[in-house]
């Protein structure tokens, strides 16, 4: 299984082409009626079976992360029924265990390499203009094609993000100096945006002390 460690080089965090196209992520899709499906894998190629077990602790919510919906596992996704109006969100810190950011220098063999952990979020819909996630694509107006990538309430400027259009390939783009981006939605179908922000901060993750957190967030919506 490809993990975030595949995009690390010694002492430097790089977003490689393999991450852009082949790395696994989490996203939400609308099911029938009020059901919402949670997928893990490459866009359009979800994993199944034991490979998606780590999603069992994911929190799916609409208004407040303290009020979540139970999810049940199917063959290649997890599913829940949402009874509230509004965009649906997901939070999990359990997709990957912390990994080593860099190898220790050979002459400092007694030192342990610092660890990095991942926080994964996902959102379905673009109707709400107030952020509720840590890292989130926020539309400038309900159902707008213009978004601001926001981290902890502040725009993430000149940042890389990735877009997967209907039936298309993942493409890397950048937010502008105000953290804004515009999506060309002339083609009907599902769009996916993927954002990433890394912060060097000491934290507890999966029972381990980490020196850095990588926040990964996706947004899916349908253009008709």
Image: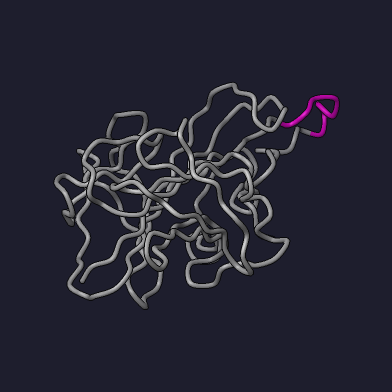
- Residue numbers of the magenta segment: 106-113
Instruction: Give the residue at x 35% y 37%.
Output: 63
Q: Is residue 135 above or below residue 114?
A: below
Residue 83 at x, y percent in the picture: 37, 49
Please name whichever residue, 106 or 117, is drawn nearer the observer in this view of the structure: 117
**Identity of the residue furthest to the top in this view:** 202
Q: Is residue 74 left or right of residue 162?
A: right
Instruction: Give the residue at x 22% y 75%.
Output: 187
**Identity of the residue furthest to the bottom in this view:** 167
| Magenta run includes residue 107 | yes
Res 135 → quadrant: top left
**Quadrant in the picture for the C terminus:** bottom left
Please name whichever residue, 35 or 218, is drawn nearer the observer in this view of the structure: 35
Res 67 → quadrant: top left
Q: How is the image coloured?
A: one colour
Q: Is residue 102 left or right of residue 14?
A: right
| Magenta run includes residue 40 | no
Residue 37 at x, y percent in the picture: 48, 61
Q: Is residue 153 left or right of residue 39?
A: left
Instruction: Give the residue at x 40% y 48%.
Output: 195
Q: Is residue 33 above or below residue 182?
A: below
Assign the magenta stretch its main secondary structure.
loop
Res 176 → quadrant: top left
Residue 14 at x, y percent in the picture: 52, 48
């Amino acid at each position: 299984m490809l993990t975030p460690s595949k995009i690390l080089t010694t002492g430097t965090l790089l977003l490689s082409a393999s991450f852009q196209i082949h790395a696994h992520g989490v996203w939400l899709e609308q099911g029938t009626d009020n059901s919402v499906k949670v997928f893990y894998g490459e866009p359009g190629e979800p994993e199944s079976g034991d490979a998606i077990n780590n999603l069992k602790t994911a929190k799916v919510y609409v208004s407040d992360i303290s009020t979540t919906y139970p999810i049940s596992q199917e063959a290649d996704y997890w599913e829940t029924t949402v009874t509230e109006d509004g965009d649906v969100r997901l939070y999990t810190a359990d997709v990957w265990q912390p990994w080593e950011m860099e190898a220790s220098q050979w002459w400092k063999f007694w030192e342990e390499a610092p660890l990095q952990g991942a926080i994964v979020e996902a959102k379905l819909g673009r109707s709400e203009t107030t952020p509720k996630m840590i890292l989130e694509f926020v539309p400038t107006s309900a159902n707008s094609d213009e978004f601001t990538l926001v981290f902890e309430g502040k725009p993430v400027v000149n940042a890389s993000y990735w877009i997967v259009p209907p039936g298309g390939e993942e493409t890397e783009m950048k937010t502008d100096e105000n953290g804004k981006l515009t999506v060309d939605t002339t083609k009907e179908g599902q769009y996916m945006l993927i954002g990433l922000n890394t912060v060097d901060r000491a934290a507890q993750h999966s029972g381990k002390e980490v020196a850095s957190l990588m926040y990964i967030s996706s947004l899916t919506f349908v253009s008709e």
